[in-house]
């Protein structure tokens, strides 16, 4: 099974790949560019990307890219909407260059518009992205949201509706445990009852899990991650998710709020201990 964490690529992609096994990770996530902005990012160095790809093959590591938070594929603002489409096209190219199988994007915020309007807007954005993207082999993963403000994509129904017109190889899902808990669609007492886990239309497209505890209670509708076992979701719920046979083939990525990257070694150890624990 694959278990890893979010890693910085500030020292290059190759350095991140080499760092992963030192932390006990056999998969990792990186930001395709500055998470808080669209601009200012250097284009990725093809030599570094090539070395990273070779190291991933040698060390048996897989990776996903995460797009900047400013991307809003459901934005009613035309300027932000088109910037978001262009940014995602770029991020898919970056992911392809780095030999990473997917890019994660949060579902959008239609602001004052309806959920249905937001779903249609996101579909149009994805159509434009897929039509203009020049690369193959990278799936766009729609991440479920915590339901902050006007965010769509909190419920299984909304996620399935957005992805429905697209081929599985092009548009998939990333499931974030903290977001699902905060959105009120997955309970700590019964996390495996999240309806997506028993829905093939969801599971067939599920290519990444963000494994995070929660700083906010059930239904708190805030995107606030906590260290494993320290939050409202808790160790027992996380153990059950980690051990669910339906999820064993999907890479788990920690995005817990560590002070320094080296602390992910402790977080990964904690997850491995939970995995080994009898239910
Ligand atoms: Zn996440
Ligand atoms: Zn989050």
Image (cartoon, rainbow, N blue to C red):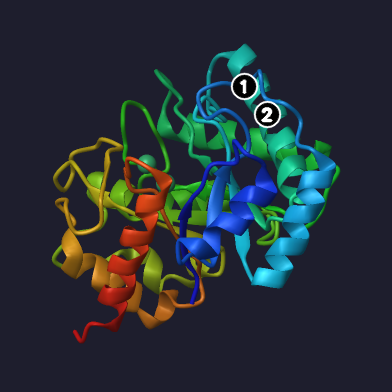
Residue corresponding to mark 1: 38
Residue corresponding to mark 2: 87
**Quadrant position of residue 219:** top left
**Quadrant position of residue 26:** bottom right
Q: Are marks 1 and 2 in contact (CB under 8 Å)?
A: yes
Which residue is rendered at x = 35% and y = 52% of the image? 263
Nearer to the camera, 16 or 227: 16
Q: Position of residue 245 (x, y in %)?
A: 39, 82
Furthest residue toward bottom: 278
Which residue is rendered at x = 51% and y = 60% of the image? 208
Nearer to the camera, 59 or 81: 59
How far is the residue under mark 1 from the one under mark 2? 7 Å
Relative height, residue 149 to residue 201 (above, below): above
- In this image, 197 relative to 163: left or right? left
Q: Position of residue 108 (x, y in %)?
A: 48, 32
- In this image, 242 relative to 119: left or right? left
Whichever of callouts 1 and 2 sits on the residue coming sooner in the sequence is: 1
Which residue is rendered at x = 55% and y = 69% of the image? 204
Q: How many marks?
A: 2
Which quadrant does the C terminus fall into? bottom left
């Amino acid at each position: 099974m694959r278990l890893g964490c979010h890693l910085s690529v500030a020292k290059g992609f190759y350095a991140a790949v080499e760092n992963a096994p030192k932390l006990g990770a056999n998969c990792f996530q990186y930001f395709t560019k500055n998470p808080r902005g669209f601009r200012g990012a250097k284009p990725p160095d093809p030599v570094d990307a090539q070395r990273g790809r070779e190291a991933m093959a040698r060390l048996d590591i897989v990776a996903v890219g995460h797009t900047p938070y400013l991307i809003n594929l459901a934005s009613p603002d035309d300027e932000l909407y088109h910037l978001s489409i262009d940014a995602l096209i770029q991020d898919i190219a970056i992911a392809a260059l780095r030999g990473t199988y997917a890019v994660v994007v949060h579902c959008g915020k239609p602001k004052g518009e309806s959920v249905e309007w937001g779903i249609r807007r996101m579909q149009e954005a994805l159509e434009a992205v897929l039509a203009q993207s020049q690369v193959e082999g990278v799936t766009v993963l729609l991440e479920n949201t915590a339901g902050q403000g006007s965010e769509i994509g909190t419920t299984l129904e909304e996620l399935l509706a957005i992805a429905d017109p697209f081929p599985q190889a092009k548009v998939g899902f990333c499931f974030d445990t903290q977001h699902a808990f905060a959105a009120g669609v997955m309970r700590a007492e019964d996390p495996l009852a999240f309806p997506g886990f028993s829905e093939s239309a969801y599971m067939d497209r599920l290519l990444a899990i963000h494994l995070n505890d929660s700083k906010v209670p059930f239904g708190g509708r805030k995107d606030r991650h906590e260290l494993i076992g320290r939050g409202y979701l808790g160790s027992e719920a996380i153990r059950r998710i980690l051990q669910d046979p339906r999820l064993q083939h999907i890479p788990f990525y920690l995005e817990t709020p560590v002070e320094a990257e080296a602390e992910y070694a402790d977080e990964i150890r904690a997850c491995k201990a939970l995995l080994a624990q009898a239910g």
